[in-house]
Amino acid sequence: MNLSNRLDYLANEIEVGEAMVDIGCDHGFLPIYLIENKISPKVILCDISNESLNKAKENFNRFLPEYTPDARCGDGLKVVETGEVEAVVIAGMGGILISEILSENIDKTLSFKKLVLQPRSHIEHLRRWLAENGFYIVKEGLVKEVDNICEIITAIPLKPYHYMYPVNLVYQRNPLTKEYLLREYQKYKGFIKSIEEKSTKGEKYFQYVEIIHWLDYLNNMME
Ligand SMILES: C[S@@+](CC[C@H](N)C(=O)[O-])C[C@H]1O[C@@H](n2cnc3c(N)ncnc32)[C@H](O)[C@@H]1O
């Protein structure tokens, strides 16, 4: 299946191995593509409208007749369990509606690894909501859709190490960024190795592992 520029951008925000839910899936093209291309091992289709959900199921049947989609009719994240997927996509709705969906159960919303959001309006409201509710915007993209230019936000739950190594280090393209991040990476690798050799794995150990993953993420952003 060929995706539009907008849906293609959304698909690229999902990493191989990440399970996802498409809230307001309508046609279902994004989850179809993610299964077809073996990007997501699991997708959940969600829509408040039965008619839209049936459209997505029919498209699944057309493109992937062997696959039975997990389709749930309901309001926003109410039909998804805490931590059930890594990535939540909410695209093609107003920014106020998106923030209402995310607000419904903030602990649940914070349990997902990543939010990929494409508001059709009130983006300033959504950005403010994310900042005030413990999310960190790691990427902002623009894609053309016919005559429209769509803004797409990727946000993750904010952690203390995002203050240590902000995404701006990468976006500023400083020639020292790569070397700096590599040094920090090696430093934390050293801490981890020493804990593994000398003591039991406590809270600090798992914090260091998370920092290593974040430094890896920043490093990949530069490639
Ligand atoms: C314009 S379509 C967007 C379809 C697709 N996400 C895209 O970006 O191409 C919006 C969809 O969101 C659904 N929707 C609206 N409010 C919703 C809610 N609270 N929970 C789940 N789906 C919702 C609508 O029924 C509709 O199918």
Image (cartoon, helix red, strand yellow):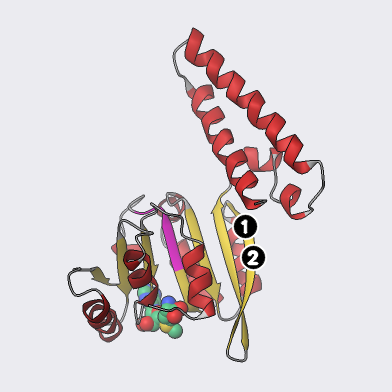
Q: Is residue 87 magenta?
A: yes
- Residue 214 vs residue 36, the one in the foreground: 36
The N terminus is located in which quarter? Answer: bottom left
Question: Which residue does the image show at 58% across and 34% down from the upper left?
Answer: 211
Left or right of residue 102, residue 182 in this image: right
Amino acid, disc 2: Glu
Q: Is residue 217 magenta?
A: no
Left or right of residue 217, residue 92 in this image: left
**Residue 169 percent coordinates (x, y):** 75, 47
**Structural crowding at the residue carrying mark 1, measured as other residues with C-alpha within 10 Å and reported as few (<14), some (14–19) or many (≥20):** some
Q: Secondary structure at mark 1?
A: strand
Left or right of residue 200, residue 147 in this image: right
Residue that numbered label 1 is attached to: 137
Residue that numbered label 2 is attached to: 140
Bounds of the magenta segment: 85-89
**Residue 7 percent coordinates (x, y):** 48, 75
Residue 6 circle label: none
- Residue 155 vs residue 196, the one in the foreground: 196
Q: Main secondary structure of the magenta part?
A: strand
